[in-house]
Amino acid sequence: MKVLLVASECTPVVKVGGLGDVVGSLPKALKKLGLDVRVVIPGYKDILYTGGGGASCKEYAIHYGGEAQKIILHQTTLSDTDIPLYFIENEKYISSGGVYMSPSAFASSKDEIERFAFFSKAVVELFVSREDVFFPDLIHCNDWHTGIIPQLIKAEARYIELKRPAAVFTVHNLANQGISSVDVLFRLDGEELFKSPLIKWDAADDNLDFIMQGILASDVVNTVSPSYAEEIKTAEFGEGLQEAIKAKSARVFGVLNGIDGALFNPQKDSYLKVNFSLESLEEVLKGKSANKKLLRKELNLQEKDAPLLGLVSRLTKQKGIDLFINSVDELLGMGFQVVVLGVGDKTLEDMLLSKMNELEFSGDCAGIIKFDEGVARRIYASSDMFAVPSRFEPCGLTQMIAMRYGAVPIVRGVGGLKDTVMDGITGFVFSGFNQSEFLGAVKRAKRVYESADLWGKVVSNCVNADFSWDKSAREYVLLYAKALKFSS
Ligand code: ADP
C-alpha cells in the first residue's frame, strides 16, 4: 500500500508539539509493516537554510489565485531511514516567515490559512493530478492545516482518469480549526469546490472551517486516543463540531499515539550527561538521582533531599498551566522542587515569569521560557514526578515520555491521559479541573513516594509500560484498509 502522510511538522526537521513527534515516528512503524510510506511538509525558510539533509530538488508550477506559482519539491529522507521526505518550497506562501506565522503557534491567522491552503493545493497537484512524482493509494492528512485536501482530491479526480486516493484525516487537536473566509475557495479552485454540497453548506455562514472539511470529506477519521474520539461527540469537548462529528460517527475511530522508543531512550539520549539503563529499578533510580543533581546545578536549584516535580509543555490554557502556576506555593509548601519548561501564550509566559520572580531566591523552583529539546529531556530524566493538568488532552505525549524516563505522571483524567495512565499503578489521576483535586493527587503521589518499596513499584510499572508505535501502526493499517474500501 502506498501512503502519503501530509502535515505541518515532522520531527526532527520541524517540531512545535506532539504532532511533529507523531509524523516523525509513525512512518517508521508503518514501513516495518511493509507499507511504502512517504511524508510531505512545507519547506519553511528555516528548513531550507539548514540544508534539509542534502535534498534533491525539482521545479514545478501550480495554479493558485488565478496565476501560476513556482514551487520547488525537495526530496530527502526521514532521519536514520530511507523513507522519502518531501518539502514544498514556495517563496510567496510557504518559505517566508517562521514555522507558523501566528504569535501563538496554533492560532490560524489569515496568512496562516493562505499558507496551508496553498500547501494543500500544491500537495494535490503534485501527488494526485500527476503520476510521475508519487501517486499514493491513500493520503493521510493531519489537523486543520491539511483539512481541505480531501475536498481537493475529490474535485481533482473529476478531471482525470486516475483512481482517486483514499483520504484519512487525523484530528490531533480539535480546538484549532483553521477558520477561513470563503474567498480562499476561489484561489484554490472555486468552481469545482463549490459543487460540493458540504462546501456550500459550510460556506453559507460566510466562512469555511478547514478541520470540519477534513473530518466530513475524508473516508475515515481518527483522533489520537480512543477517549478523545468519544469526548469530541460532546458539547464539552466538541468545540462546536459535536453534531457534525456524531453524524459521521460510524467512521470516527480512536488510535492511541505511541512514542519512538529509539528517540526517547534514557540509555542512549545524547541530551543527558548521565545515561541510564531501564534494565533494573536500581539502575533507573541511580540514573535519575545523578541527573537530578546535574539539573539542579544547571537551573540553580539547591541540592537537598526533596522530590522534583517537572512540567514540559506548550504554555496554553488547554494544558492547565494557570492551574499549575497557581498551585506552585502549595507545592513548595509540601516540600517539592518545581521545574517548568514551556513557551506559548504571552499571558501565561508572563504569569509564569512573575511567579518565578516572586520565588527567585527560594532555590526550589525554576521556570524556563523557551523551546529546548535538551532541557526537556533532562527534566524528564531528573523529575520524580511529572505534571499534566490539562483541561482537555487529545492524546498527550509528555506523560508517556515521562514514564519512559522514570518520572511518575500526575495527570487529569481526560482524553489520552485517561487512556495511558493507570491511577496508583503508572501514575496518579485526578478528575475535576481544580486546584484541590490536582493537589489531592500530588499528595497521594507524595505519600507513595515516601515509601521506597511502593514508589519503586510505581516507577517500575512506568518504565515497563509499552507505548511503542507497533500496536498503533497495526491499527492505522486497519484504518487505511477501511478507508480504501469506503473510497472505492
Ligand atoms: P502538544 O502536541 O499538545 O503540544 P504533546 O504532549 O502531544 O502536546 O507533545 C508535546 C511535545 O513537545 C513533547 O515531545 C514535549 O516534550 C515537547 N515540548 C513541549 N514544549 C516544549 C519545550 N518548551 N521545549 C522542548 N520540548 C517541548
Image (cartoon, rainbow, N blue to C red):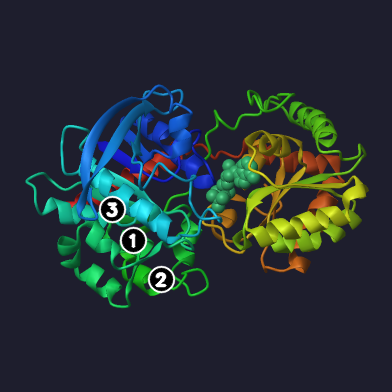
Q: Which badge, 2 or 3, comes first in the chain's sequence?
A: 3
Q: Name the residue type under label 3.
A: Ile
Q: Nearest to the eye among marks 2 and 3: give it.
A: 3
Front-most of residues 357 and 461: 357
Front-most of residues 59 and 404: 59
Q: CA distance from mark 2 to mark 3?
A: 19 Å
Q: CA distance from mark 1 to mark 3?
A: 11 Å
Q: Which residue is mark 3?
A: 149
Q: Which badge, 1 or 3, comes first in the chain's sequence?
A: 3
Residue 337, x across and y down, in percent:
85, 47
Whether 271 is drawn above or below 102: the answer is above
Pointer 2 local density, CA inside 10 Å: few below 14, some 14–19, many at least 20: many
Whether 186 is drawn above or below 12: the answer is below
Mark identifier at residue 241: 2
- Farthest residue toward the left? 161
Q: Which residue is mark 1?
A: 215
Pointer 1 local density, CA inside 10 Å: few below 14, some 14–19, many at least 20: many
- Please state if 254 lies on the left or on the right of 436 as rendered: left
Residue at disc 1, secondary structure: helix
Q: Name the residue type under label 1.
A: Ile
Q: Name the residue type under label 2.
A: Leu
**Is residue 456 something one can see in this rendering?**
yes
Tell me if label 1 and label 2 are in contact, CB under 8 Å: yes
Residue at disc 3, secondary structure: helix
**Is residue 429 something one can see in this rendering?**
no
Residue 371, x across and y down, in percent:
63, 42
Q: Residue at x 54, y 59 (%)?
A: 415
Front-most of residues 326 and 383: 326
Whether 71 is drawn above or below 211: the answer is above
Which quadrant holds residue 353? Answer: bottom right
Q: Residue at x 15, y 67 (%)?
A: 195
Q: Residue at x 27, y 51 (%)?
A: 167
